[in-house]
Amino acid sequence: MTEPTTPVAPPPFTAADYAARRERAARSAEAAGLAGLVLTPGPDLLYLTGYAPVAITERLTMLVVPVGGEATMVVPRLELPDAQEAPGAAAVGLVDWTDGSDPYAATARLLQPGRYALSDSAWAMHLLGLQAHLPATTYAAMTTALPMLRAVKDEHEIQRLTAAGASADAAYAEILGVRFAGRSETEVGSDLADLLRRFGHSQVDFTVVGSGPNGANPHHEMGDRVIRDGDMVVLDFGGLQHGYGSDTTRTVHVGEPTAEERAVHDVVRDAQQAGFAAVRPGAPCETVDRAARAVITAAGYGEYFIHRVGHGIGLTTHEPPYMVEGEHQQLEPGMCFSIEPGVYLPGRFGVRIEDIVTVTPDGGRRLNRTSREMAIVA
């Protein structure tokens, strides 16, 4: 059994880091013809202030980042002490409100007529409350208005993602020594979750164990099915370490695979490599999808590759940019995303192989280093 080493904690983000992010966000909003950003609790608020409310309730918390003005956050008075302690709150004005008062009136005073980028996860009641006070304002979802807000990671963010990937790799190396046959998917998934925590994850978000025909469902997580000798098993798992995500997939086989199973696995592995080889600054995101998909289509399995080839990752597991046909956004150094082609044969088995990749000045670098060859488990 591998004993985890004590990881070196990355340096914390500073008030200056958060201030620079807000300044960059305001410039991006101005360039997009927006009046500013309006953010509710979630990854965007965390990214710009370091503040994550302990409990997300119906009480309004909202950060306003106007173009050409100072950022201000409206918070419930009972949460004001926590907001004041946020690492990026030093240069943010704080306006508190009490139960029984109107938080939308307090927020409306911070907004000018115009169009704002709004957190994707904002509650409808909060948006409608604002519009009742400011009918001259309009809003666009953050992913639509400013999709690249968090897409390009800095050195310290990539350091966190690299550490999370290394921990996921260590968990995979350990799970290969665990008994699969005769145990349920849920039992193996529990082992995976325990390993992620043992190797440094503070949060486990998902542990997919898709055995046999369950592996042909890309969104199957795990169930009571007992894994059998001869099963192909899709393992897709990840979570958060130092606040940033991991997400990796490998497909293993219980006992010796058939020639067809090996052939399908080889096709997916070659497709994953082709997608990685297509990563370079200036290339549209869709070229990564095209490169991987071309390999699978040429092998005759195109109709069984039923999802995009990748998604961005950072504070959340899925975020822009997306590696999908029609995404013309160009790759930039510092972008981090998955490359995860798959083939899913209904009622039989599935194969998926996934690495997180970061764009470098001359290509790409994998943040997952485990073998992409098919592993045989007991």
Image: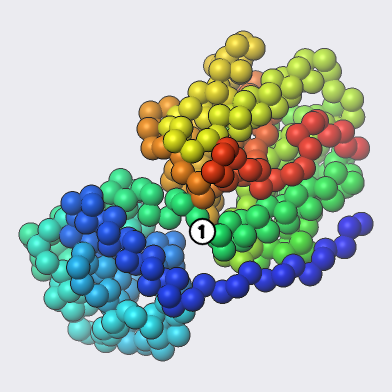
The quadrant of the picture occupied by the N terminus is bottom right
Viewer-side residue, 364 vs 346: 364
Where 154 sits versus 236, above or below?
below
Residue drawn at (76%, 17%) of the image: 263
Residue drawn at (63%, 48%) of the image: 247
* Residue 346 location, quadrant: top right
Viewer-side residue, 261 vs 4: 4
Amino acid at pointer 1: Asp
Residue drawn at (55%, 34%) of the image: 279
Question: Where does the image place residue 317, in percent across and percent down from the top left?
Answer: 54, 51
* Residue 61 location, quadrant: bottom left
Residue at the spot of label 1: 154
106 horizontally vs 303: left or right: left
Where 56 sits versus 187, above or below?
below
Viewer-side residue, 162 vs 78: 162
- Seen as rendered, the residue at the extreme front is 362
SS for tag 1?
loop
Viewer-side residue, 367 vs 308: 367
**Label 1 crowd bin: few (<14), some (14–19), many (20+), radius 10 Å:** few
Where 273 sits versus 198, above or below?
above
160 horizontally vs 378: left or right: left
Question: Where does the image place residue 222, in percent across and percent down from the top left?
Answer: 68, 44
Q: Is residue 57 visible?
A: no
Q: Is residue 64 visible?
A: yes
Question: Where does the image place residue 158, in percent across and percent down from the top left?
Answer: 58, 56
The quadrant of the picture occupied by the C terminus is top right
151 horizontally vs 255: left or right: left
* Residue 133 location, quadrant: bottom left
Residue drawn at (68%, 52%) of the image: 165
How is the structure coloured here?
rainbow
Question: Where does the image place residue 373, in percent across and percent down from the top left?
Answer: 79, 31
How many numbered discs sit on the rendered protein? 1
